Image (cartoon, grey):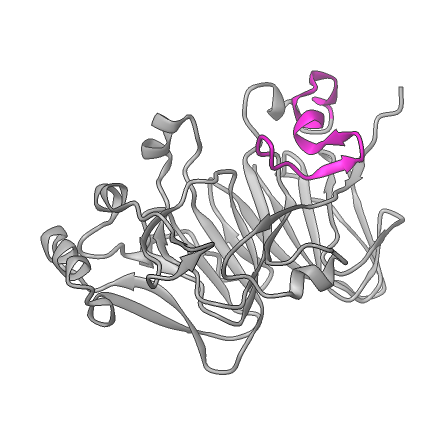
């Protein structure tokens, strides 16, 4: 039986009230308001596909494919989720659970990181808060003192931002992002600008937010964020590497269970498969990766 060593993925797409039309254009879609392309996903009912008849989740759960995942799939759920996010309007101010909190919902936690693919001049994100105690945090939420509560951080194209679980955050308008995260779909909103989605305000999740938020705010100075030019992050949850390839080169990641790859600039080939902008692949454990062409890609994996 043929055992593939590389798979090209077909994304799963998600409607979002805040979306622009970039994903519709990039992926040649008919649908409107597609805010997220889940380009590497193995979540139930939201999995990317490896063919018209098979999802990545189905391939991962098949024990015959243990060779591809170094047997990681025999004991663990698929650990990572990769998205392209197109924000035309501001996303809600939100927080995600850690592994311990998410366990009650049979889920992983949701630590994530962003690579800024495009954004407008002088843009920013919401990143953190100024409350010193939980009581102060609740009071500022109750009185809608958002300008006093929320901290912002400037961003520009090609920035990298690490967003651990329990960190209050929001992507702002006119931003296109590559997001690598733990494979979880749990988001708790604290503020959504009182906007309407199909005539109704979206649900807030204040009880969960109050259970999770750190007061005073989470200190990020201790997080394992890589300061080398290639490794954007390297920790127990995931690794993310930026490769700016010229001509033809072969890469190998000996510490990876398997490798995820997304093209974020130009086009070329990956192990002789055509690779266009935002195409994504998974490559089997210990398999060399031959990249041909002047293209930039993001490599992600778990150890």
Image-quadrant location for residue 231? bottom right
Residue 82 placement, left or right of 166: right
Q: Where 282 sits versus 131, above or below?
A: above
Residue 99 placement, left or right of 37: left
What range of the chain is rendered magenta? 43-67
Residue 29 placement, left or right of 96: right
* Residue drawn where x is 77% and y is 58% of the image: 28
Was residue 59 drawn as part of the magenta stretch in this picture? yes
Q: Position of residue 202 (x, y in %)?
A: 38, 51
Quadrant of the frame with the C terminus: top right
Q: Position of residue 97 (x, y in %)?
A: 35, 41
Q: Can I make out residue 162 in this image? A: yes
Residue 8 placement, left or right of 123: right
Q: Where 280 sits versus 102, above or below?
A: below
Q: Position of residue 195 (x, y in %)?
A: 38, 62
* Residue drawn where x is 25% and y is 47% of the image: 206
Image-quadrant location for residue 149? bottom left
* Residue drawn where x is 52% and y is 69% of the image: 159
Q: Position of residue 33 (x, y in %)?
A: 59, 58
Q: Can I make out residue 244 in this image? A: no
Image-quadrant location for residue 10? top right
Was residue 137 drawn as part of the magenta stretch in this picture? no
Q: Nearer the viewer, residue 68 or 200?
A: 200
Q: Residue furthest bottom?
A: 121
* Residue drawn where x is 74% and y is 39% of the image: 283
Q: Where 129 sits versus 135, above or below?
A: below
């Amino acid at each position: 039986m043929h055992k593939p060593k590389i798979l090209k993925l077909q994304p799963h797409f998600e409607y979002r009230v805040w979306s622009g039309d970039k994903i519709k254009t990039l992926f040649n879609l008919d649908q409107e308001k597609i805010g997220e392309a889940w380009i590497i996903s193995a979540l139930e009912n939201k999995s990317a596909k490896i063919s018209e008849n098979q999802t990545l989740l189905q391939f991962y759960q098949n024990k015959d494919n243990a060779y591809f995942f170094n047997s990681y799939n025999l004991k663990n759920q698929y650990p990572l989720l990769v998205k392209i996010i197109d924000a035309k309007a501001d996303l809600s101010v939100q927080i995600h659970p850690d592994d311990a909190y998410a366990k009650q919902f049979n889920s992983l936690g949701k630590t994530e990181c962003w690579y800024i693919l495009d954004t407008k001049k002088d843009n920013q994100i919401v990143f953190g808060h100024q409350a010193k105690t939980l009581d102060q945090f609740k009071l500022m939420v109750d009185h809608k003192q958002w300008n006093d509560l929320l901290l912002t951080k400037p961003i520009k194209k090609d920035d990298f931002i690490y967003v651990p679980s329990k960190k209050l955050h929001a992507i702002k308008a006119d931003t296109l992002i590559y997001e690598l995260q733990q494979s979880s779909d749990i988001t708790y909103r604290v503020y959504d600008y009182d906007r309407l989605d199909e005539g109704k305000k979206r649900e807030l999740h204040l009880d969960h937010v109050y259970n999770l938020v750190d007061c005073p705010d989470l200190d990020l100075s201790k997080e394992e964020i890589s300061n080398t030019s290639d490794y954007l992050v390297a920790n127990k949850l995931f690794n993310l590497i930026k490769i700016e390839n010229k001509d033809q080169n072969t890469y190998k990641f000996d510490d990876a269970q398997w490798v995820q790859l997304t093209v974020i600039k130009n086009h070329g080939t990956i192990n002789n498969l055509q690779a266009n902008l935002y195409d994504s692949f998974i490559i089997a454990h210990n398999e060399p990766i031959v990249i041909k062409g002047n293209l930039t890609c993001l490599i992600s994996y778990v150890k």
